[in-house]
């Protein structure tokens, strides 16, 4: 049974379409990155899955049931983008309160707080917490009751690199235990190794969905080859020119190296033509990263998007 299924879902606020024809699923034990610019529709998608709003069109099913059904909601953990807590209460008091609301066992509270690195701070009032500590408490709240579906909105905001690595370790553990996880963000730096698939949302439409190799194929962006010359760089440039004939490569000088951008389907033909020249001492292949692919799909002018100035 899928953690959620969105089938041709559309939604509008007032008169404005904010989601168009979205079809997306999440399997148990899968981590999905939901990426998009400000106002792309990420939070609206999460609200539909939480059952806080109903779709204008299409179907939303969550853990085999209906979004918003309390029997379904008790298995969902959610970390909102901006976590706020009662400043006068301690971390332990707040988490115990949420445990009661969720019908989760209060016995797990100290363990969860320790798991997110708040063991020493659990009895301090949250007004004394740093931003990162509040974020960790928010995460502990989302992890209450071992959710089968966990949705995290900008989870690494405020976390230092060590806490970020801890978070990903924790998510990996939950994934291994069969939870489905959604990481919602404007691309998180370094998230690439931790997600199974990415969905790229722009202006309410899904532009691309898949694992990294499939996204690379969908984007069909050039691969960059970094070439070091055996001798003079000019002879390497001549050899590159000859080998690239008819293959549509773009050449750049970068210090004592040449960089060649070439369509992925032409890469092997180019290398087979170039390497016999004997002009290449070494080569490195740079595939487009998730960030490159994201920028490709949303367009480089991120701020030009609706809501981009927020
Ligand atoms: N309650 C609302 N009433 C009217 N319009 C709304 C409402 N909530 C969101 N919107 C609009 O819907 C669009 C999508 O918003 P949403 O919050 O889903 O985007 P997002 O991708 O989560 O953005 P961000 O990264 O800035 O949080 C935006 O244009 C936003 O202005």
Image (cartoon, grey):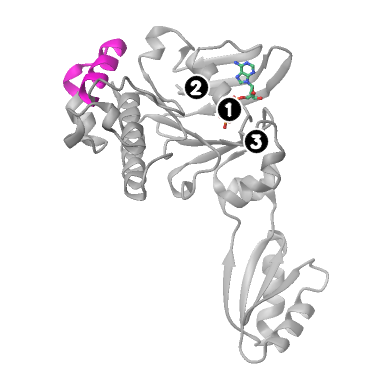
Residue with the most extreme right position: 246
Residue 71 placement, left or right of 121? right
- Residue 208 spot, x, y in % from top left: 64, 38
- Residue 246 spot, x, y in % from top left: 83, 69
Residue 254's image quarter?
bottom right
Q: Magenta region, mostly helix, strand or loop?
A: helix
Q: Report if the CB atoms under discs 2 and 1 are less than 8 Å apart.
A: yes
In primary-sequence order, the first of circles 3 and 2 is 2
What is the quadrant of the C terminus in the image? Answer: top right
Q: Report if the CB atoms under discs 3 and 2 are less than 8 Å apart.
A: no
Residue 63's image quarter?
top left
Element marked by disc 2: strand
In primary-sequence order, the first of circles 2 and 1 is 2
Residue 269 placement, left or right of 110? right
- Residue 215 spot, x, y in % from top left: 61, 46
Q: Nearer the viewer, mark 3 or mark 1?
A: 3
Q: Is residue 301 inside the magenta stretch?
A: no
In this view, the residue in front, 193 or 246, is 193
Mark carried by residue 308:
3
Badge 2 density bin: few <14, some 14–19, many ≥20, Cα 10 Å:
many
The residue stretch that appears in magenta? 91-108
Element marked by disc 1: strand
61 above or below 257? Answer: above
User: Dot 1 corresponds to which residue?
Assistant: 24
Badge 1 density bin: few <14, some 14–19, many ≥20, Cα 10 Å:
some
User: Dot 2 corresponds to which residue?
Assistant: 4
């Amino acid at each position: 049974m899928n953690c959620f299924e969105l089938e041709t879902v559309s939604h509008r606020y007032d008169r404005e379409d904010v989601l168009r024809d979205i079809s997306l699923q999440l399997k148990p034990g899968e981590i999905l990155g939901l990426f998009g610019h400000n106002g792309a529709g990420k939070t609206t998608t999460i609200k539909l899955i939480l059952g806080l709003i109903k779709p204008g069109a299409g179907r939303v099913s969550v853990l085999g049931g209906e979004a918003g059904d309390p029997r379904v909601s008790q298995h969902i953990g959610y970390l909102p983008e901006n976590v706020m807590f009662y400043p006068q209460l301690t971390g332990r008091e707040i988490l115990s309160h949420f445990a009661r609301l969720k019908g989760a066992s209060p016995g797990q509270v100290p363990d969860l707080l320790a798991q997110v690195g708040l063991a020493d701070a659990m009895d301090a009032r949250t007004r004394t917490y740093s931003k990162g500590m509040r974020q960790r408490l928010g995460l502990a709240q989302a992890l209450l009751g071992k959710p089968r579906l966990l949705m995290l909105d900008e989870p690494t905001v405020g976390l230092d690199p060590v806490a970020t690595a801890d978070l990903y370790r924790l998510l990996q553990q939950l994934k291994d235990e069969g939870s489905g996880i959604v990481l919602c963000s404007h691309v998180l730096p370094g998230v690439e190794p931790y997600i199974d698939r990415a969905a790229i949302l722009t202006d309410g439409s899904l532009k691309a969905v898949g694992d990294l190799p499939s996204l690379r194929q969908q984007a069909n962006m050039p691969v960059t080859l970094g070439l070091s010359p055996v001798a003079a760089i000019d002879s390497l440039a001549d050899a590159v020119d000859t080998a690239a004939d008819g293959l549509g490569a773009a050449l750049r000088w970068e210090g004592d190296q040449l960089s060649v951008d070439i369509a992925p389907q032409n890469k092997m033909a180019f290398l087979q033509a170039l390497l016999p020249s004997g002009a290449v001492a070494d080569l490195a292949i740079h595939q487009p990263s998730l960030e490159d692919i994201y920028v490709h799909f949303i367009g480089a002018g991120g701020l030009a998007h609706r809501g981009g100035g927020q």
